[in-house]
Every structure is written in structure tokens, then in C-alpha cells.
Image: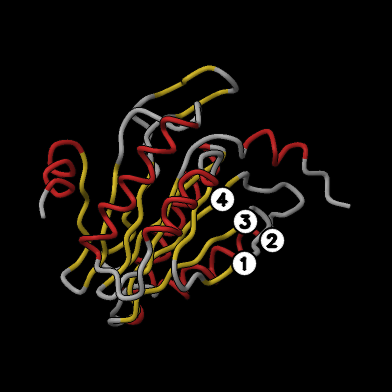
């Protein structure tokens, strides 16, 4: 039987979300970092661009997650030099799965979402600390606020949803999670990946987009 005591200790806080759309993929997170009941930071970044077609969200141990981001950015640059194109979300997920599985005896305490485009095909994956992953065809969420967030996303999700509508839904789901989960809070960052590239929305820009009809 796996000893999950360490896993449970580090995997309590945050909310991250990913949504498949007709024209791309949308991911988002809050910005609160906690150490037990202590709020360590209100400006933690949990959404990371790997390339114009590829991004990740992180939850769990900050140092572990940041190391994986550094590895993926380096691997992506090496792949581009050799192949002339960036990693696809599926390839990035496979590589992360191998790294996590090889370190399962001293695991990275992380839960990850990998999102992006392979050509024009939107792809979304979730990974656990031991390298297990699943391809998501609609949406996914991680962290202690995920039960609240996923409840809203499940109701708001419609087949053929656009990135514009998904940005609003993700932002709303995160704001609801902030109200119900003490480890989720402070600011919202949402990113969309479409054929035009990677774009982030936060603060007043996000407020304007949400308010737009």
C-alpha cells in the first residue's frame, strides 16, 4: 500500500482548472500559497507558458513544481532545435510522466495540468505525483478548491464552448472556490491557447472580458 501521508500534506491548497474549447484550451488558477494555515504568499504564479502552443498549471510543493517547469522549458527548447517545432501537449505529458514515475520513491509532490494545441487540436491532461495521467476531453480541476470549482464548470460547460466563454466560466469558478476554500484566494490568472498563440488575462483586463457581452 502506498504511504500517502506526505502526498496529502502537500496537496491540500489551491485551485487550478483546465477546459477544452472549440477553438483552443483555457487554464486558470488563484494566486494564494499556503503553509498549513499560514498564507505564505498572495502572488504565487501557478500558470506557466512553456511555448506559444503549450502551458501548465501547478499545485503542490512549490520547489518541486518550479523544478519541473524548468525541466520542461529546457526540454522544449531542445526539442525545437532538433525537430523545428515545439512539444505537443501529449509529448510534454509523456515526458513528465516518465520523470515523475522515475522519481516515485522520492516523489515530486505535485499535481499538474498540461494544456495546449497539437496543430489545431486542443489537448488537456492531468498528472498525479507518480506519473499517472489522464486525457481530459472536457475539463479538469485540481487542488482543495476543485470540488467547488468543478461543480460550477460542469454546469456551465457546453459542447462547442469558445475560449472567450470558457475564460468567463473559469474565472467565475475560481471566484466561487475562493469564497468556499480558505487555501484558494487573492488573485485570478486565466490563460487561453488558440491558433493565434498564448494569452493571459488578469486584473482589470479579465474583469473587462468577463463583463463584455
The answer for how far apart the CA atoms under marks 3 and 4 are is: 5 Å
Q: Which mark is residue 102?
A: 2
Q: Earlier in the sequence, mark 2 or mark 3?
A: 2
The answer for how far apart the CA atoms under marks 2 and 4 are is: 16 Å
Q: Is residue 205 above or below residue 83?
A: above
According to the image, label 4 marks what residue?
A: 111
Q: Callout 2 environment at 10 Å: few (<14), some (14 to 19), or many (20+)?
A: few
According to the image, label 1 marks what residue?
A: 98
According to the image, label 3 marks what residue?
A: 128
Q: Nearer the viewer, residue 142 or 84?
A: 142
Q: Is residue 64 above or below residue 131?
A: above
Q: Callout 4 environment at 10 Å: few (<14), some (14 to 19), or many (20+)?
A: many
Find numbered disc 4 in the image and state the secondary structure of the residue it sits on.
strand
Q: Nearer the viewer, residue 179 or 46?
A: 179
Placement of the C terminus among the 4 image quadrants: bottom left
Q: Position of residue 186 (x, y in %)?
A: 34, 28
Asked if the residues shown at circle 3 and circle 4 are in contact, with their CB atoms under 8 angstroms apart, the answer is yes
Q: Is residue 43 above or below residue 175?
A: above
Q: Position of residue 106 (x, y in %)?
A: 72, 47
Find numbered disc 2 in the image and state the secondary structure of the residue it sits on.
helix
The answer for how far apart the CA atoms under marks 1 and 3 are is: 12 Å
Amino acid at each position: 500500500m502506498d504511504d500517502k501521508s506526505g502526498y496529502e500534506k502537500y496537496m491540500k491548497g489551491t485551485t487550478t482548472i483546465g477546459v477544452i474549447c472549440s477553438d483552443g484550451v483555457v487554464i486558470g488558477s488563484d494566486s494564494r500559497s499556503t503553509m498549513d494555515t499560514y498564507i505564505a504568499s498572495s502572488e504565487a504564479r501557478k500558470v506557466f507558458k512553456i511555448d506559444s502552443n503549450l502551458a501548465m498549471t501547478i499545485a503542490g510543493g512549490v520547489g518541486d513544481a518550479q523544478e519541473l517547469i524548468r525541466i520542461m522549458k529546457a526540454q522544449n527548447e531542445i526539442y525545437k532545435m532538433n525537430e523545428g517545432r515545439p512539444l505537443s501537449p501529449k509529448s510534454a505529458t509523456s515526458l513528465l510522466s516518465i520523470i515523475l514515475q522515475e522519481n516515485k520513491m522520492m516523489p515530486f509532490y505535485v499535481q499538474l495540468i498540461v494544456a495546449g494545441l497539437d496543430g489545431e487540436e486542443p489537448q488537456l491532461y492531468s498528472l498525479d505525483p507518480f506519473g499517472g495521467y489522464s486525457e481530459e476531453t472536457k475539463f479538469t480541476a485540481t487542488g482543495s478548491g476543485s470540488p467547488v470549482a468543478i461543480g460550477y464548470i460542469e454546469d456551465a460547460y457546453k459542447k462547442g464552448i469558445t475560449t472567450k466563454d470558457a475564460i468567463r466560466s473559469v474565472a467565475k469558478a475560481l471566484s466561487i472556490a475562493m469564497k468556499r476554500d480558505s487555501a484558494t484566494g487573492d488573485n485570478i490568472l486565466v490563460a487561453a491557447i488558440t491558433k493565434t498563440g498564448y494569452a493571459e488575462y488578469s486584473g482589470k483586463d479579465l474583469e473587462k472580458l468577463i463583463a463584455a457581452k
